[in-house]
Amino acid sequence: MSNAPKGMSAIAKQAMLMPKESLMTAKNRKQELNIGIPKEISFQENRIALTPLSVGLLVNNGHEVRLETGAGNGAKFSDNAYSECGGQITYDRQKVWESDIIIKVGPPTLEEIGMMKIGQTLISGLQVATLKPEYLKALMAKKITAIAYEYLRDEGNILTVVRSMSEIVGSTSIHIAAELLNTHNGKGLLLGGVVGIPPTEIVIIGAGTVGECAARTAIALGADVKVFDNSVYHLRRLQENIGTRIFTSVIQPVVLEKALAKCDVAIGAMRSKEGRSPCIVSTEMVNKMRADAVIIDVSIDQGGCFETSKVTNHANPIFRHQEVIHYCVPNIASRVARTASYALTNIFSPILLELANAGGIKNYLWENAGIRSGVYIYNGQITNKYLSNQFKLAFKDLDLLVAAQN
């Protein structure tokens, strides 16, 4: 069984014992890709999956890339920039959606799925929190192979897109806090420290990637940072990664309440693997915070970890509760869309090149366990157990399906 790819399930390994005369002839046959990049229509989604230079790289490798006109406007990439790199700009949305591979940031709408053809490959976000069964059934009916980039893993088994976006969101949250402290009728404080003046106090709830990057940025600006998390392991890892001693604590309500009552900024960055994020800070705790203090609830896309949080948007990003400023925009990365687009393209362009070199999606999934982890529909079959259980749809083992077709 030495030829079985790493991460392949036992049942799929058994399937390898079956004769497959076509396996070696199909492998390593480079395939020319036809890639479509539609314009994002999700509310305030400004990112794009591929930058002009990445499109040029794909075109130079013999692939065709079609873009709907204006697809890069949100990230300040013009149609002309894409055209000069070899991208085909079209005003015909239908033509873009008929490409063999569709790659985009937000999940497609039911109307957009209606423009797709049988057997395409879709690479996009999934957004489980707002997912409807009709969405999955529409993709299944067209035998789409759908890959959710939130679940893609790299060589180190890290959720590569999630980590990249979390790094951006963590740093951006501190810059947002700095802006809110000295504008929007805030305290008029400079976030950080100046000689002879006490530094700004920041409380970060959550020691994951968002919390770590927020802490790193705040410390660089000279702020006094306190980090809370339920996991001692996460706190220890954050301490080691930052490389300097900062206040860390497990979440003890009395200690957290005392820290929040004194702080200038509180950032909520607690995440849940499934479902709603844990609600850590009660209304009573928020009521005891200083007037004009700032709350940035990064976890609002999962419900938020402040009881007083409610979803806002980039047009109207803040509201006040008991004189405490709340910033609860779910898609913070879209605020810095150009930087976020560069981060996405650094992940997606190598994947597309490797997919082509493997000879197509079937061979690529066979060889790459990290990509298989992102597949939730394969040729119209649900391959994600959570979605199968959530919506009571028949589940198929992806490893077995891929092995059977190779």
Image (tube, helix red, strand yellow):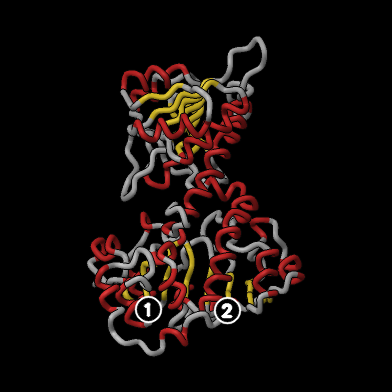
Q: Secondary structure at mark 1?
A: loop
Q: Which label is found at residue 239?
A: none
Depth order, front residue of 24/141: 24
Q: Is residue 43 above or below residue 180?
A: below
Q: Quadrant of residue 134?
A: bottom left
Depth order, front residue of 237/217: 237
Say which residue label 1 marks. 379
Identify residue type, mark 1. Answer: Asn
Quadrant of the rendering where the C terminus is positioned: bottom left
Identify residue type, mark 2. Answer: Leu
Task: Tell me if 278 is positioned left or right of 210 in this view.
Answer: left
* Whole-percent x, y for residue 387 in the image: 30, 63
* Whole-percent x, y for residue 7 in the image: 35, 63
Depth order, front residue of 167/66: 167
* Whole-percent x, y for residue 19 in the image: 31, 87
Q: Secondary structure at mark 2?
A: loop
Label 2 crowd bin: few (<14), some (14–19), many (20+), radius 10 Å: many
Q: Which label is found at residue 33?
A: 2
Of all residues shown, which one is farthest toward the top? 196
Who's the residue at 63% across and 12% down the image?
197
Res 323 seen here: no
In space, the residues marked 2 and 1 are separated at their CA atoms by: 18 Å
Q: Is residue 334 above or below residue 392?
A: above
Q: Earlier in the sequence, mark 2 or mark 1?
A: 2
Q: Is residue 371 above or below residue 268?
A: below
Question: Answer yes or no: do the residues labelled 2 and 1 have beta carbons within 8 Å?
Answer: no
* Whole-percent x, y for residue 136 in the image: 35, 70
Who's the residue at 67% across and 13% down the image?
195
Res 109 seen here: yes
Depth order, front residue of 104/232: 232
Who's the residue at 41% across and 89% down the image?
22
